[in-house]
Image (spheres, rainbow, N blue to C red):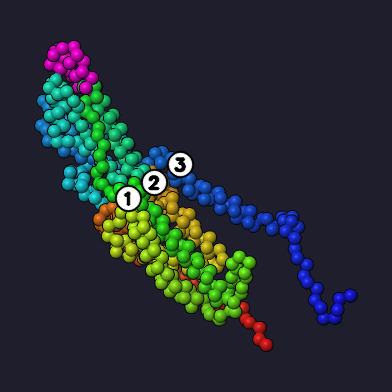
Amino acid sequence: MAAEGSQEAPRQARALALARRPKLWLFPTVLCGLLAVVLSLLYMGGIVNPTGHLHRLPIALVNADRGAPPPGQPANLGTQLTKAIVAGTPDSTVDWRQVDEAGLREQLASGKVYGALVVPEDFTADVTALVAGGATKRPTVTVLTNPGLGSLGSSMAAQIAQNAAHQASQAAGRELLAAVPPASPATAAGPDTGATARLLLADPFAVATQVGHPIGSRSGLGLSAFYFTLLAVLTGFIGGNIIHNGVDGALGYSDSEIGPWHTRRPTVPINRTQTLLLKMVMTAGIMLITTSLVLLCTVGVLGMDAPHQPMLWLFAYCASLAVGLGVQAINAAFGGIGQLISMFVFIALALPSSGATVPLQAVPSFYRFLSVFEPMRQLSDGIRAILFFDARGDAGLARGWTMIAIGAVLALAFGFGMTRYYDRKGLHRWTPQPTD
């Protein structure tokens, strides 16, 4: 018999015995399954078929041809070519923006177009010389790329422009061959010369591709803006959750467990509003350090091309701070599940709707809707403008600053509104401590 006053140690549970309980499996299985389904559909749904979802991708179209209209023609050949390109492309897939050369430079420099197709000023004269047999090479139209908007979007625009030019060239070739009689000067110089001339006329102009708005060689082919944005968002998201959990552990509202060491500090009586204020103040301070370290590592250590570094630091800090404040507000309002909710708000829904890797014009309409308010699109536009477009406001920087301000105000209003409501209802977090 046990000695009087002794206590029997509680019988410890066995893992395999607990694993036989179906209820223990139910909640995590359902939640993990739903998470896998939703994340799979969200992430892959935005990238599996960019050409099939193409919707009005902006590409500039420039007719610099200054030649006079050929006899019997209403306009010069450059005008006819650009009209044929626009008419031959569905409006639902490409937004051909017909501008002059000055407008083209403006559109490229502000990131408004993913590329351009330029008809040269001597286009009519060169084609006329080709028909007359006075030329031995084809005139060239130029496709310009804009890699600052991302390698995928720029390459899609280049491919579309190249295909449109080739199709227009073949269509023009059929008309030119039909108009050239067999005994024309193009064939009178001899069978070899005539065969060469008719071969040139079958596809009368060539297409050359050039970079329209160059970016630095250490810019990740235009993807450095996206990854720097991702760093800013992850810094705010992960940092906000670390601060949230750290403060709760330090104030005694959650257990602290590192390896085999487990502690539970005495609970500090503090209401929800004051707790949220503390977390937000710490977020503002710690983001100063983390943003500086991000810039030091990416620019100082890795050598990323980054003009306007003070503005880049300030924008990245405000972006991380806005995300961090949003994380604190969501966690304060929803408790333990708040980290999952903030993950969807700032990561799961934001990444596929950012337009930073796949253009928004090449994703389903659901993602274009999300891009109106999801933070990563606004932040990536701002950082892209700083890195690649001379920090121009109309390149996305002005919208980025506006959305950062709106996001910070919403986070403060929502967070403190919910905590004050809980405090007024007497829904305190602390557990009364026993007294001796």
Mark 1 and mark 3: span between their CA atoms?
A: 28 Å
Inspect the magenta stretch and tell me whether residue 178 lies in it.
yes
| Circle nearer the N terminus (1, 3) | 3
Classify mark 3: helix, strand or loop.
loop
* Residue 51: x %, y % from top left: 39, 39
In the depicted structure, whether residue 199 falls above or below residue 91: above
**Residue 215 visible in the picture:** yes
User: Which mark, by number, is residue 48?
Assistant: 3
Q: Which kind of residue does numbered mark 2 sit on?
A: Val
Q: Which image quadrant: the C terminus?
A: bottom right
Residue drawn at the location 75% of the way across and 60% of the way down:
14
Label 1 environment density (alpha carbons within 10 Å; few <14, some 14–19, many ≥20): some
The residue wearing badge 1 is 218
Residue drawn at the location 69% of the way across and 58% of the way down:
24
Asked whether, in this view, residue 245 is left or right of residue 49, the answer is right
Q: Which kind of residue does numbered mark 3 sit on?
A: Val
| Circle nearer the N terminus (1, 2) | 1
| Circle nearer the N terminus (3, 2) | 3
Inspect the magenta stretch and tell me whether residue 41 lies in it.
no
Q: Residue furthest right?
A: 1
